[in-house]
Amino acid sequence: MSTSPSVLPPTGRPTSHRAPRPTARRRPRLRALTVGLAATLALGATASLAPSAAARTPMYFGSVAGGYEQAQAGTGENLANHAYSTFSSKPPTARMITVHAGSAGWRQVAKAAPGSALYNDIVRWAQTIKARGGHVMVAYNHEPEAAAGGSRGSSADFIAAYRRVVNIFDSQGASNVEWTWQMTAYAFRTKPGDSRAAAKWYPGDAYVDNVGADAYNWASCGHGNGKWNELSWLMEPVIAFARAHGKAASMPEFATNSDARRSQWIRNAHQFFLNNQDILTAAFYFNRPPTVKANSDCRWALQNSTEYDALGDIARDRAHFTA
């Protein structure tokens, strides 16, 4: 699949498994819970600038496929990989995988019947990822709201398709999957009445482990309005949504347009991750050119050693981040 940052304008507790459905038994926890999280939330305390002694296991940090190798070379560090693919292809090996069903609409996915080619492909994916073991973040059809009113279908169709995919994986015992609902950060900031509003596309607490948002500081490129937005501002409503639903949060894609302030933006992002380490589980920098024509003037890929050093410093913070 060709990855792309959101075509929308600019405007996160560690992973808990999905709540059990009547037909599914409770899965093991995918990652350890923060010891003091419940007490912290109950008291309404805010995260301190310094990392908490009760912090959970390190969050995954890396880059998106298509710029992953360049990010590793530029930082000189081992990074987590976020890959994109289709059910008809072989599942890539990556820390996070986003998958869709090719040209099939969401209603087709929702109605995928045993014995059909699509159903068999989803089963093959579930069995392959289960056999690999380990923990894998999986997202179905990223940024669905960006296609609102398009050929794939409505928000109700997307929700039905998402649930169908999760149920098929569950039927195959793929309990090592962390289901990540991958939206745009904008969807969490827009008005509730907007057809792209995140709540309209939410598959439900029983089907989501991780609230993911693709967060971009457009600034003066693409759909930007010239405003410089820190990652903390972009992600604020995403984290609020995740906390309200008792879920983890992540950034399957994040980046900022090229600017003299980019290295500092990344360093500020590093501190933002630390401030919210009780709920954030992963972040993948979009270190590649845009793949959407409307964003063709955006320069997401890092360009010099100062910028790569800022990204590398996050990866080198092994007490808090891992590949």
Image (cartoon, rainbow, N blue to C red):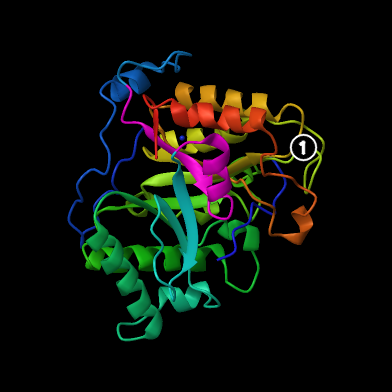
User: In this picture, is 154 found above or below 105?
Assistant: above
In depth, the one of 160 and 132 nearer the eye is 132
Residue displayed at 43% across by 25% down: 317
Q: Residues within 10 Å of mark 1 (few under 14, many from 20)?
A: some
In depth, the one of 271 and 141 nearer the eye is 271
Where the C terminus falls, by quadrant?
top left
Residue displayed at 66% across by 27% down: 306
Residue 120 image position (x, y, % from top left): 33, 79
Residue 11 image position (x, y, % from top left): 69, 40
Residue 171 image position (x, y, % from top left): 23, 67
Residue 103 image position (x, y, % from top left): 55, 77
* Residue 201 left/right relative to 122: right
What residue is pinned by disc 1? 219
Q: Is residue 231 magenta?
A: no
Amino acid marked by disc 1:
Ala
Q: Secondary structure at mark 1?
A: loop
Q: Is residue 76 magenta?
A: yes
Where the N terminus falls, by quadrant?
bottom right
Residue displayed at 73% across by 41% down: 218
* Residue 238 left/right relative to 29: right
